[in-house]
Amino acid sequence: MERRELYDPEDIEQLLIERSFDDLLEEERAFVLRHLSDRNEYERMRALLLRMHTDEEDIPIVDAAPSVRDRVMDVFRAQQQPHWRIWLNGVSAFMMPQDRSGYWRPALALGSLVLITTVALIGIGNMDQNEAVQLAELKVESSKQEMEKPTPTTIQEPLPIAGAEQKIATLKEEQASSPSTFDTKDMTVESESDKNSQFETPAVPLADVASINDDAEDRSSASVEEVSPSAAFKFTASDTVAGGRDALAKHHVTSNELIMNGTTATGSAVQAQSALLFEIGTRAKSDGKASRREKKAKAEEMADATEFVGLLRAAW
Amino acid sequence: MGLFRTDHATLSDERLMEQIVRGDERAFGALYDRYKRKLITYFSRMLWNDRERAQDFLQELFTKIAQKPQSYDPSRPFSTWLYSVANNMCKNEYRREGTRKAAVPHLQAELIHIQPNHGDGVDKANFRDRLDAELDRLEPDHKATFVMRYHEDMAIKEIAGVFGISEGTVKSRLFYTLKKLAERLNEFDPRTLNHGTPRTVRS
């Protein structure tokens, strides 16, 4: 059976330091001789070890220069400084470079900063203005909407009174210069504005006045609300002529009568306008009546609801 | 006065590093004072006894600690971490000046003439020079292991932690390095000196 190794080769160091070859035990000596050639080798190694130990004691102590410590401590202090100081140092070095040719960098940086700030300020100002304009537009639009609401009582159509008055004036002049008799067949009473207006006044020859008056009598029984403005005008115009139907059939029309007819026609235009106003007014009244009825119905419903609520409360 | 004042000299390395991370300048100074001699000796041994360079390396090492104290891994013993950083710095230096520095020990060794019987002080100086020259011929890791063990008096476990290897590997490495050096420094064997004649060493 193989004998168990008691020592590793590396453990010879302890034997070398402690004992000479002659002082080794038999087992130790056998172990040493397995790793070393002979006694002399063992003794050389031991002598070297012992000499190194004794020489180490004689070697003067080597010390570092104090300047090394100072430099190392400076490095440590610099490392412990706050970083913002280093940052500030970097800023100052950037803003004031030693070389003059390097000034374009801080100039460019500052110029860019100023430009960006200006643009930002202008942009913010424009945004405020746009908001104000938008508000104003909203107000304008709301006021426009209010203005555009239909007002049933307003009338924008010009009244044909001025043209009729002019016509009367010209007729008076002609009467002053002309003979006293007229060909009544060609005479028509017509205002200029009637041609363009929706309330067109029909040109009525005096010869046909009788037939017109007949129609007028039939229509006079109709209610004002049912007839159209033009029909109303016809009614009023024929109504003025109706009184003198018999007289017209017997004698010629004098200039005074013609003038009277003109004024009647003018008056009929005014009457047409007033009839129109009357119709609009009656419509507004009917609308108002309808709205009042609706309100009334609603109020009644509400009243029913309040009654219902009251009943509910009483039940509770 | 000293009621609330911490005595940094009594604090462990790891505790000092915690305070350094928080920005304690005095802790940093205490740690520097604790390791400056060991490290400058180590750098001096590792860097061909060049004391100026050793000082530069010492400064560089503590500058790294001052700039990035967070790089220290608290799970490891501080001394182990510190020597591993120092060893890596030396390896980088070997790489940078490998060819030139590799030639210097040979030249120095060729010029060394051992004169053992001219006095004890001279003999000791010769032995140190010779030993340094032989150490420079070793592999960097073997040299570093030897220096840590026999010059810095570090424990096997610490050395193993620095290199990230087992303790057995460290012991084995030390044994074979010692055996090799003993062969090369045979002329300094006292028995040889007593019985033999002085001779010029040519490595």
Image (cartoon, coloured by chain):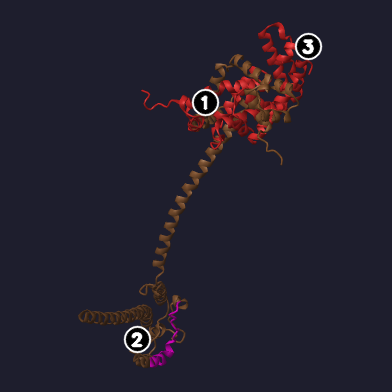
Chain colours: A brown, B red
Q: Earlier in the sequence, mark 1 or mark 3?
A: 1
Residue numbers of the magenta segment: A197-215
Q: Which mark is residue B31?
A: 1
The CA span between labels 1 and 2 is 122 Å
Q: Secondary structure at mark 2?
A: loop
Specify few, some or many for label 1: CA neighbours under 10 Å numbering under 14, 14-19, or 20 or more: many
Residue at mark 2: A224
- Location of residue A186 in the rendering, given as x and y in whole percent from the top left corner: 47, 84
Q: Chain of mark 3?
A: B
Q: Secondary structure at mark 1?
A: helix
Q: Chain of mark 1?
A: B
Residue at mark 3: B199
Q: Which mark is residue A125?
A: none
Residue A95 visible within the image? no
Left or right side of B38 for A200? left
The residue depicted at 65 percent of the width and 30 percent of the height is A11
Amino acid type of the residue tagged 2 in the rendering: Val
Name the residue nearer the viewer: B17 or A285: B17
Q: Locate residue A164: give its quadrant.
A: bottom left
Amino acid type of the residue tagged 3 in the rendering: Arg
- Location of residue A293 in the rendering, given as x and y in whole percent from the top left corner: 30, 82
Left or right side of A99 for A207? left
The CA span between labels 1 and 3 is 46 Å
The residue depicted at 72 percent of the width and 25 percent of the height is B179
Q: Tell me, yes or no, whether the two marked residues, 1 and 2, touch with CB atoms within 8 Å.
A: no
Q: Chain of mark 2?
A: A
Residue A112 visible within the image? yes
Residue mark closest to the camera, 1 vs 2? 1
Specify few, some or many for label 3: CA neighbours under 10 Å numbering under 14, 14-19, or 20 or more: few
Image height of B172 relative to A62, above or below: below
Q: Secondary structure at mark 3?
A: loop
